[in-house]
Amino acid sequence: MSKVTCCAVEMAEAEQTLSFYQKAMQSADNTVACKKISLDDKEKSLMQFAQEMEIQLVLKMGQIEVPLRGCPSDYANAVLVMCEELLRVNDCIVETGKRKLAAMHKSMHLQKVLSQYEWQHVCAKMTMEDLQRDLKDIQEFKV
């Protein structure tokens, strides 16, 4: 074979190898793009979940402020709420508690009244039975 033919064969092999690697690289790029889109979707979903998550925060009595030490990390896990809003919620809780106590007192009073009426009914029934026995004795008594 001539030198030109050998070079042409080598060139064809190189082009074929280049084509193979370009296709492999394109395939890898497509895979990376798909994974990136999937990752972005999962990140958005996680962010939405974190924003819509309901939590219950329990603090010690009177602890409505974040202790400050002078660094931004003081606020890393804090949710800032206006003090007026907390006081308004506390007032609502206190008012609801007062209404609940009033309802409980009313229920207790009604239970006492009901017990008293039941006792009076039992007493009246026993008195009626005694009077009926006395009446029966009087009717059976011959003069």
Image (tube, rainbow, N blue to C red):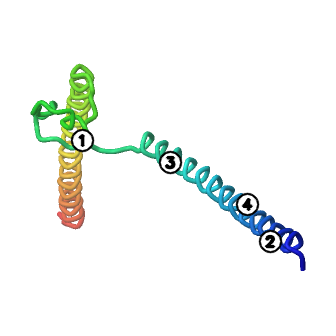
Q: Give the foreground label among 1 and 4.
A: 4
Badges 1 and 4: C-beta atoms under 8 Å apart? no
Residue 74 left/right relative to 10: left
Residue 25 picture location, percent across and down: 68, 60
Residue 68 drawn above or below residue 107: above
Amino acid type, residue under disc 2 in the picture = Glu
Label 2: which residue? 10
Kindly identify the residue that appears in the image at 19 percent across and 58 percent down: 126
Residue 66 left/right relative to 107: left
Q: Give the foreground label among 2 and 1.
A: 2
Q: Element type at marker 3?
A: helix
Label 1: which residue? 107
User: Label 3 to label 1, Cα distance in Å?
Assistant: 53 Å
Furthest-top residue in this view: 84
Q: Earlier in the sequence, mark 2 or mark 3?
A: 2
Q: Element type at marker 4?
A: helix
Q: Quadrant of residue 51?
A: top left
> How many labels sit on residues?
4
Q: Element type at marker 2?
A: helix
User: Label 2 to label 3, Cα distance in Å?
Assistant: 48 Å
User: Label 1 to label 4, Cα distance in Å?
Assistant: 83 Å
Q: Quadrant of the N terminus?
A: bottom right
Q: Between 71 and 31, which is closer to the camera in this rendering?
A: 31
Residue 91 drawn above or below residue 116: above
User: Label 2 to label 1, Cα distance in Å?
Assistant: 100 Å
Kindly identify the residue that appears in the image at 87 percent across and 69 percent down: 4
Badge 1 local density, few (<14 within 10 Å), some, or many (20+)?
few
Residue 125 picture location, percent across and down: 23, 56
Label 3: which residue? 43
Amino acid type, residue under disc 3 in the picture = Glu
